[in-house]
Image (cartoon, rainbow, N blue to C red):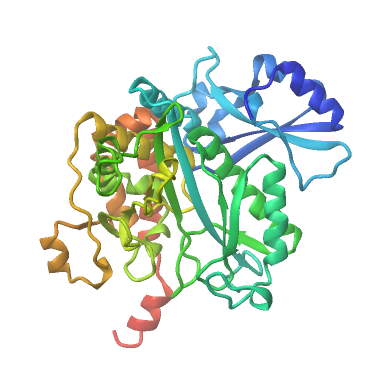
Amino acid sequence: MGSRSKEEILKLVKENDVKFIRLWFTDILGQVKSFAITDNELETALENGMGFDGSSITGYQSIEESDMIAFPDTSTFELLPWRPKEKAVARMICDILTPDRKPYEGDPRYILKKALKRANDMGFDHFYIGPELEFFYFKNDQGAEVLDKGGYFDLTTLDVASDLRRDTVLALESMGIQIEYSHHEVGPSQHEIDMRYDDAIKMADNVITYRIIVKEIAQKYGVYATFMPKPVFGENGSGMHTHQSLFKGDKNSFFSKKDKNYLSDTAKKFIAGQIVHAKEMSAVFAQWVNSYKRLVPGYEAPVYIAWSRRNRSALIRVPEYHPGKEQATRMEFRSPDPACNPYLTFAVLLNAGLDGIEKNYELPESIEKNLYNLSAEERKDLGVASLPDSLGEAVNLLEKSDFIKKALGEHVFSRFVTLKRKEWDDYRIQLTKYELDKLLPIL
């Protein structure tokens, strides 16, 4: 949906009996923040934005300079389907501005817009993204008690969440999010609903909306939905495989008829950029202590930095080309998880790819062997490195990265490092059940 005029929004509000409008934005970690205004305030909000105190928002301003303005993006106006139809509730996603009306450098949406401007300046009109978010349904948020023992693509009685998923898909579609398909995932009580690819800003907006809808509909059914990367020991974690392509107009810049893999030079350099920067980006696309419980060999989570056409153990997969489907030529980056901040994740992925194009990075040979089955020596001989294996290691790499500092900007970069360093330190001092069970009886 393109931008709408102020008059169109006011008309929609009247026609749909909208009483409250929630203004959404995210903090630095991608958690949605929101405050509601009434229909009487709407005209003012559309003209001037709404002021709020940014000092309480994670990663935003210090107390001395905390005045912020939330400026609604009219293209994001949608009714919230889980709220009553009478005196209905709508939402708009906001850009955050400083009091002098400039984009606020701590706003994750602005960081992605900056990356897209870089792509535009390099001649690309669209950065298309198709993320696949997985999640679990549990009885409640107190533990990982599953609703079913189903497996991949299972149907009927094993999949008690069919109605839940159906209502979720209908709610997503009613908010303008196109859904391709939904199914039971590999783990018990694990699910996936796939959105149709879209432009990066729209898609990042869709991801935060998707996460809220999945949780709201689950709550309506009296269950709990979580995007925690690895909530169940011994089962697959939840990923967010991220399909990407660059277009000039309606022409896919990743496709080439001449290449044996049907990949253009642009695509190869773009993929090479993400391979080169994968380690230092890790703390952004896998930003929680728990993310690294998912990123271990053997559970379908790719930890080895390589690319492949068929091999799902590699970090990057290039889906097979089918004749006549040039537009579908894309790359799939398989390590992000659905608890990331999508604005920052898409921004660093795009910047990494653009670095590859600008600096002519060389794409290594694809690796079609199953990387999980190779020894450390064999992987080393092939030149295959691994992602960091803890948040602590990931933050150390991020902190030293000029590439990430440039991609996120100094403001977000320094605050992100501080927050993640604190999370790692808090985690490191915990005593786990594992230690007490294993060590207390023998030491």
Residue that protrudes farthest toward the bottom in the picture: 442
User: Can residue 397 be seen from the camera position used here?
Assistant: yes
Residue at screen point 62% across, 68% down: 138
Residue at screen point 32% across, 44% down: 281
Residue that protrudes farthest toward the top in the picture: 100
**Whole-percent x, y for residue 101 in the image:** 54, 14
Residue at screen point 45% across, 57% down: 239
Q: Is 341 or 29 nearer to us in this picture? A: 341
Residue at screen point 55% across, 25% down: 96
**Whole-percent x, y for residue 6 in the image:** 72, 17
Q: Quadrant of the C terminus?
A: bottom left
Asked whether, in this view, residue 182 is left or right of residue 364, the answer is: right
User: Can residue 429 be seen from the camera position used here?
Assistant: no
Q: Is 262 or 393 nearer to us in this picture? A: 262
- Relative height, residue 259 to residue 147 (above, below): above
Q: Is 318 or 281 nearer to us in this picture? A: 318
Q: Is 238 or 322 nearer to us in this picture? A: 322
Q: How many marks?
A: 0
Q: Quadrant of the N terminus?
A: top right
- Relative height, residue 120 to residue 79 (above, below): above
Residue that protrudes farthest toward the front in the picture: 323
Asked whether, in this view, residue 442 is left or right of residue 291, the answer is: left
**Whole-percent x, y for residue 67 in the image:** 57, 21
| Residue 50 quadrant | top right
Asked whether, in this view, residue 377 is left or right of residue 208, the answer is: left
| Residue 38 quadrant | top right
- Relative height, residue 376 to residue 84 (above, below): below
Residue that protrudes farthest toward the right in the picture: 86
- Relative height, residue 283 to residue 289 (above, below): above
**Whole-percent x, y for residue 347 in the image:** 40, 35
